[in-house]
Amino acid sequence: MRIDHLKPLNYLESECQQMQLLCDRIHKLRENENLEDARSAMLKYLGELKRPYLTAVEEKLLSVLESEYRER
């Protein structure tokens, strides 16, 4: 996702950058061809958020997925 696509959502520049980083993290995980259903569902949920940040629990879940992905 490009930052200019986020501008119509009235995000600040810093929020656009946060969204870009989040999008990049999710995209990297989705490239894994061996995604389990639960992992795929979680990434779908996180990718559909309409806010430029993750809650503490969402961040932990994404970090766990990233950790699992690196191990494989």
Image (spheres, rainbow, N blue to C red):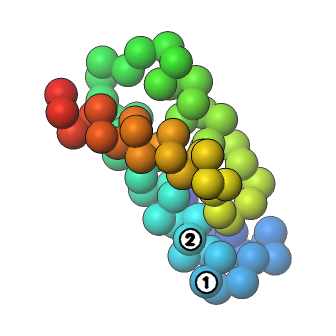
Query: Which numbered disc covers residue 18?
Result: 2
47 and 72: which one is in front? 72
Can the viewer see residue 16? yes
Point 38% across, 20% down: residue: 35
Locate residue 52, reporting x and y percent: 67, 65
Query: Which numbered disc covers residue 6?
Result: none
Query: Which numbered disc covers residue 14?
Result: 1
Q: Residues within 10 Å of mark 1 (few under 14, many from 20)?
A: few
Locate residue 12, reporting x and y percent: 72, 84
Alpha carbons under labels 2 and 1: distance apart: 6 Å
57 and 39: which one is in front? 57
SS of the residue under disc 1: helix
> On the image, which quarter does residue 13 sit in?
bottom right
Kind of residue at disc 2: Gln
Tell me if residue 51 comes above or below residue 29 in the rendering.
below
Image quarter in which the C terminus is found: top left
Q: Residues within 10 Å of mark 2 (few under 14, many from 20)?
A: some
Point 42% across, 46% down: residue: 63
2 and 69: which one is in front? 69
52 and 61: which one is in front? 61
Can the viewer see residue 2? no
Point 28% across, 34% down: residue: 69
**Tags 2 and 1 in contact by the CB under 8 Å rule?**
yes
Kind of residue at disc 1: Ser
SS of the residue under disc 2: helix
Locate residue 33, reporting x and y percent: 30, 22
> On the image, which quarter does residue 11 sit in?
bottom right
